[in-house]
Image (tube, rainbow, N blue to C red):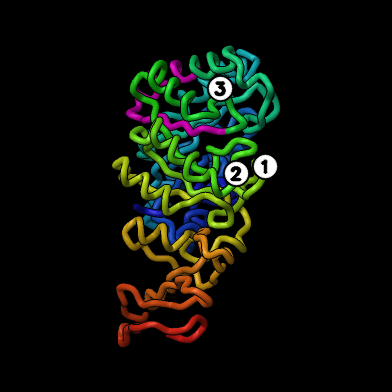
Amino acid sequence: MRIGFCTTDYPTLPADELFGRMAAAGAQVTQLSFASVAECGFTPSGVFEIPFTVEEAALDAIRAASEKYGIEIVCINGTYNMAHPDPAVREEGVARFAGFARAVRALGAPYVSLCSGTRNRADLWSAHPDNDTYKAFADTATGVMLLTPIAKRYGLTLALETEVSNTIDTPEKARQLMDEYGGGALNMIIDCANLFHPGQAYPQQVRYVIGHAFEVFGRDIVIAHAKDIAEGAGVQFCPTGEGIVDYPYCIEQLRAHSYTGDMLIHGVYDQAKRPPRCGFCVHCYDAAGGKSCAYTRCRHHRRDGRHRLCRCMRHSACGRICHWRGAQCVKLCRRPRAFADRRTRCSGRVSAGRPC
């Protein structure tokens, strides 16, 4: 399982600088937004997050940066408000998608992410009381049916995620949309943080909420996002590892449902919280095949000893891993590898804070 970032977590930058920053953080893959690339000259609105077209020079810059830093573009954001109450807006979204799909095909990305939309006129990610109506669902379904032939024409797969603020806010609605209107071209993005509704974001609910989603659409997941949600009665997202999402369980479910794709970290907008070589839970790396991070800080577990995504990470130089062991954080050498000078190796167990 490769690890990467969504470019929407970064400011708009020239392609080379954007991919360079992701590479410095250890990204192997990315989910791209054209609005993140300065050469595209596109500024998203609260309704449309895709341009009508992308200039060839911008595509060349993105391709060059992707190849230079070895970061594969696995998904590109194709989001607009598919449930906007104004039919003219929805029609423009479909018109934009045709030119957008050509650009996606030119970059070789296999997946396009969608937003199911909202009745909120100002912002496609904001809730509205009418989102739960049949008409809102029907408008989203119509949008999917109109986009499906375009996606098939360019060999693309559409991917949607449940969003509490959008029309598709439950696994059951996602299942219905795929089965009845997806035309074989619609699959799912799993973002465990987005599965929680108000009143559900508590530790005792985590495995039930996540497990239920996998039961409903686990076999249809093509992209996995790593975002987090804070404990509480509301819906407050937070950087990966700072909330209640049980990522070891999430990865266990991904493997159980034969997921072979990547994990894209999402929602870490503060660079100070984006550590070197990606801030992700070491236990998730173990579950994902032992991928390593170079995050040296340790955010201790809860006092009751219950695992809550500790921030203890493998050192880049020697492969040490921090683990919680009762009263202190200790480092264990796992799969030791040479230091940069390739003359010495790390071995054994040492107390936290000591040199390797």
Residue 345 seen in the current view: yes
Q: Nearer the viewer, residue 1 or 206?
A: 206
**CA gap, disc 3 and disc 2:** 27 Å
Q: Where is residue 137 shown, x and y percent of the image?
A: 54, 17
Q: Is residue 128 magenta?
A: no
Amino acid type indicated by mark 3: Met
Q: Secondary structure at mark 1?
A: loop
Q: How many marks?
A: 3
- Rendering quarter of residue 75: top left
Tag 2 residue: 201
What residue is shown at x 46% (from left), y 86% (from top)?
355
Residue to which mark 3 is pinned: 82
Question: Where is mark 1, residue-wise?
Answer: 233
Dots 3, 1 in contact, CB < 8 A: no
Amino acid marked by disc 1:
Ala
Question: Pointer 2 and pointer 1: residues touching (CB < 8 Å)?
Answer: yes
Q: CA distance from mark 2 to mark 1?
A: 6 Å
Query: Disc 2 marks which amino acid?
Result: Ala
How crowded pointer 3 is (Cα within 10 Å; few <14, some 14-19, many 20+) is rated as many
Q: Which residues are magenta?
A: 143-163
Residue 150 place in picture, x, y as percent: 40, 21
List the single residue furthest toward the front.
304
